[in-house]
Image (cartoon, rainbow, N blue to C red):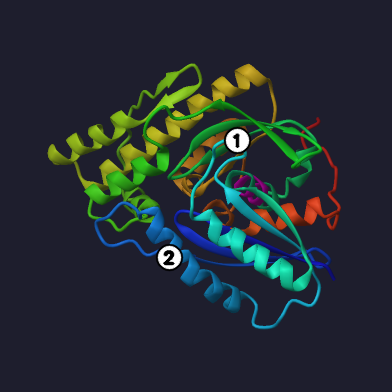
Amino acid sequence: MPEYLGLDTSNYTTSCSVFDTENGILRQEKKLLPVKNGEAGLRQSDAVFHHTKQLPEIIEKLLPERLSNLSAIGVSVRPRNISGSYMPCFLCGQTMAKGIAAVTGAKIYKTSHQIGHIMAALYSAKKLSLIERTFIAFHVSGGTTDCLYCEPCSDGLIKITEIGTSLDLKAGQAIDRVGLMLGLKFPCGKELEKLAVKSDRRWKVKPVIKDGNCCLSGLENQCKKLISDGTTPYDTAMYCLKSIEKTIAAMTREALCKKGDVPVIYAGGVMSNRIIRQSLESEFGAFFAEPEFSCDNAAGTAVYAAIMNGGMQLEYTDDFTD
């Protein structure tokens, strides 16, 4: 019964998962890094400290008993698989992976946080067979608003080419900044959605798109003005989320125009939002990770390790042919 351990120490979640490929069971534990009320994030030195403290705790919680058949470890070691991509917080997971591997003899498969998100989304949506073909993936979170063209490759499973990105503020940053204006606690995504669902106002939004890229910096100022003009928190929250929804939709249309009719999958914490998801699902027939696999998690790195180690057989069925 081969087992695969996944680790991810990102901003702002410490995460560990175990994937039992024989029984198809994936378990995970994760814990948000503590952020003080009113603040919009952490310094990297603080993030490293909290990951170092939290990672052993969640591993112990996930694994009350020792793994008896640990075959490999998947770990995110950088934000993206591009030159110069680096954040100190990923050293926590990488160091833990090296220590466990040294004791157990398990192999280590290093990947990026972004690949982990995509693999978790594919697993959650039951679309892992897409790694054998081309598809478009969105990674939309506090640090990224990226539209990615994904192709199969022998080294690292997926070759990623950026099609579009945010030229300024990221979608998750916009949500958190607007949420903090409304008195919500960081990270603000879930609470902002709870406010927005109470709104029945229909907003007309024109996204700012430049050659497939987006600009979201104006959204923060627009929401600030709405608040100062006395707009209700419900309607302001809805305006924020609708603006992001329309922006992602416009980026998707441009990407499909460039790359043809290929499958689209959405990953990242912002894409767990039900308001945004419903519209995109309807228009593009796209696939989404379930909420527990949308936000930062180690599930994708465990799945990555299983596939790279040859411990998982994919079902190569084409769900997209007529």
**Secondary structure of the magenta portion, mostly?**
helix
| Helix, strand or loop under label 1 | loop
Q: Is residue 67 left or right of residue 173?
A: right
Which numbered circle lies on residue 49?
A: 2
Q: How many marks?
A: 2
Indicate whether residue 118 is drawn in magenta.
yes
Front residue of 151/49: it is: 49
| Helix, strand or loop under label 2 | helix
Residue at left offset 66%, top offset 20%:
259
Residue 231 position by quadrant: top left
Q: Is residue 234 left or right of residue 270?
A: left
Image quarter of the N terminus: bottom right
Crowding at label 1, few (<14), some or many (≥20) Cα neighbours within 10 Å? Answer: few
Q: Is residue 35 left or right of residue 154?
A: left
Expressed as whole percent of the image width and height from the top left, the position of residue 125 reads: 67, 49
**Is 241 located above or below residue 294 in the figure?**
above
The amino acid sitting under disc 1 is: Ile
Crowding at label 2, few (<14), some or many (≥20) Cα neighbours within 10 Å? Answer: few
Residue at left offset 71%, top offset 80%:
66
Residue 36 position by quadrant: bottom left
Magenta residues? 116-121
Whether residues under marks 1 and 2 lie with C-beta atoms below 8 angstroms apart, the answer is no
Front residue of 198/142: it is: 142
Which numbered circle lies on residue 82?
A: 1
Image quarter of the C terminus: top right
**Is 262 located above or below residue 299 in the figure?**
above
